[in-house]
Amino acid sequence: MVPVRNRAGRGALAIAIAPFGRGGRVAGLAALARIRPGAYARSRNFLDGAVSRLSPYLRHGMLSLAEVRDAALRVRSRPEVDTFVRELAWRDYYVRVRAALGDTVWNDLEAYKTGEPATAYAENVPDDVAAGATGAACIDGFVRDLVDTGYVHNHARMWFASYVVHHRRTRWQAGASFYLRHLLDGDPASNNLSWQWVASTFSHKPYFFNRANLERYTRGTYCATCPLARAGCPFEAPYDALAARLFPNGQRAVETVVTPDLRVPADAAPPAPDVTDGAIVWQHEESLSRDDPARTLARGDAVFVWDDEARARDPWSDARTAFVREALDELDLAAIVAGDAIEEVGRFARARGATTIVAVTPVDPRLRDVAAGLARSFDVVLVPPEPFARLDRSVDLRRFSRYWARAERSAFPHVRPLELGIETG
């Protein structure tokens, strides 16, 4: 059950603060003030490296990619933030791919390049993997991090995905679903497309790792106590020997998959929104900030809907629910209601005599369907978020390199003088 409240008071049900940290823009800005772009570039692959931990705030629109980029550029020169901004660009890229494909991101976008057909992979994550009981200290530790905190370092995500897909021969969709149930930053854009990159269904070859790689970037933390360290470690081998074991038929495609068309047009300048007085604001899970463009434009009463059907189909962990609840508590919303989003937002608008509903342009196809449903009865104005980069011409998004060749120049604009007390590194 999700608490429902209005300005008269809070619901009686309390949810513990997520172990990751508080949700909301205030906490996001505090985390942003601690980023160290220079140290990030040097240490990001280490599990104790200077990573930003901003992904849950970006996922839910508490921060924008553009303001994170700008914050980094205020304190470090262009060469020192290249790595950091390029990683932000991957998120922008994945969002663009999902916007183009919708729920097709759940399909194999290309064939596996593992010498095996898709039918060779199991449909479900093995029970011992889901329970964190494989006996491999690293894999089991990654599962504990995921379930207990809702956050996993990006390098650990890649190692875990590689183990699930290539060592345990499990379809990437099963692993992606397992992650989405727990991640605070759970997003089918970054999550699914990263799993596809590891699996090789959205990349040129499969990603895999060996023990030396893991020991280096974990500083031996897991191997020192692992019961499989002396014998039985599945990752103990040189890369060529490990590749021969995992991919006995070679790293190649053995079936044909028709890749969806991913050529997108150049970014058009959005028209200036025309919003009359009395419009209401629909804030959804991609726009949980008092400073989001819809709130800034309309300045009317705002509503958030816990969509019962969506949460039944796509359940959130308690930690993620708490993280979002904390963000909602600082939004000064007129109402938080539970139910069908189209019905509840429509009811909220009619109660205020509003004929216009304003919202940040969503990426999730389900949220787009809500906007389309509302548009049957109201004027719906969708406001795009502040762009991270602009594509100056048509681009084929089948590979990041093609996107970045068009986006890189606009991803490094002139920025304002230092406004945040951000640590340097």
Image (cartoon, rainbow, N blue to C red):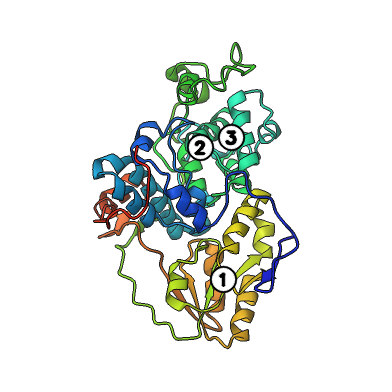
Q: Give the amino acid at mark 3.
A: Ala
Q: Label 3: state its secondary structure.
A: helix
Please name whichever residue, 357 or 36, is drawn nearer the observer in this view of the structure.
36
Q: Where is residue 376 in the image (x, y as percent from the top left)?
A: 55, 81
Q: Position of residue 338 (x, y in %)?
A: 68, 68
Labels 2 and 1: the sequence-earlier one = 2
Q: Does 333 sit above or below residue 81?
A: below
Q: Nearer the viewer, mark 2 or mark 1?
A: 2
Q: Mark 2 and mark 3 in contact (Cβ < 8 Å)?
A: no
**Residue 423, image quadrant:** top left
Nearer the observer, 109 or 283 = 283
- For the N terminus, the quadrant is bottom right
In three-dimensional space, the C-alpha distance between marks 3 and 1, rounded to whole angstroms, equals 37 Å
Mark 1 crowdedness (10 Å alpha carbons): few <14, some 14-19, many ≥20: some
- The residue to which callout 3 is attached is 120
Residue 213, given in percent of the width and then of the height, sits at 45, 23
- Residue under label 2, please give it: 153
Q: How crowded is mark 2: few (under 14 residues within 10 Å), some or many (20 or more)?
A: some
Residue at image mark 1: 370
Distance between the alpha carbons at the discs numbered 3 and 2: 29 Å
| Residue furthest front in the image | 421
The Cα atoms of the two marked residues, 2 and 1, are separated by 33 Å
Mark nearer the N terminus (3 vs 1):
3
Residue 40 visible? The answer is yes
